Amino acid sequence: MIICVCRRVSDREIARHARAGMSFDEIQFELGVATQCGRCEGCARDVAAQCSAAHPVAALQLADPSLERATWTASFPASAAA
Ligand code: FES
């Protein structure tokens, strides 16, 4: 999805740069995102923050760890688990 219409920058491009460890300022300099009208800045910052190497997906924690097991088992039919 295009996040920055002015510079035609997609969420994937922002995410790829964020995962590579770049800060938002570096991404902005590299891709030009949020450097014209600025309307995309909030969304671009959100994407960068969600994909930042400082916040890896593996670090996510569920409020109730038992929910993870319940979700996992609920998505598998009993015959597939045997
Ligand atoms: S939409 Fe990104 S600078 Fe205008």
Image (cartoon, helix red, strand yellow):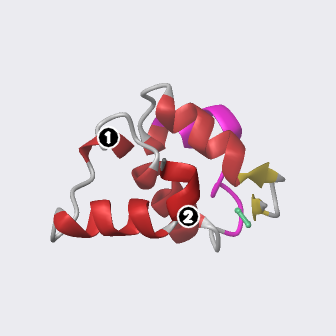
Would you say the beta carbon of the disc 2 residue lies within 8 angstroms of ligand 1?
A: no
If the picture is divided into quarters, which one holds ligand 1?
bottom right
Q: Position of residue 71 (x, y in %)?
A: 39, 68
Q: Secondary structure at mark 2?
A: loop
Mark found first going from the N terminus, 2 or 1: 1
Q: Secondary structure at mark 1?
A: helix
**Pointer 2: residues within 10 angstroms few (<14), some, or many (20+)?**
few
Q: Residue at x 46, y 41 (%)?
A: 25
Task: Give the labeled residue for mark 2.
Answer: 77
Query: Residue 27 colored magenta?
Result: yes
Query: 58 above or below 34?
Result: above
Q: Residue at x 42, y 27 (%)?
A: 21
Disc 2/disc 1 C-alpha distance (Å)? 26 Å
Residue 7 falls left or right of residue 43: right
Q: Residue at x 57, y 33 (%)?
A: 17
Query: 49 above or below 6?
Result: above
Q: Position of residue 19 (x, y in %)?
A: 49, 33
Residue 5 falls left or right of residue 34: right
Residue 70 falls left or right of residue 4: left
Of residues 57 and 64, the one nearer the viewer is: 64
Q: Which residues are magenta?
A: 26-37
Q: Is residue 56 at all visible to an observer of this figure?
A: no
Q: Position of residue 28 (x, y in %)?
A: 57, 43
Task: Give the labeled residue for mark 1.
Answer: 58
The three-letter amino acid code for the residue at tag 1 is: Ala
Q: Quadrant of the N terminus?
A: bottom right
Q: Residue furthest top?
A: 20
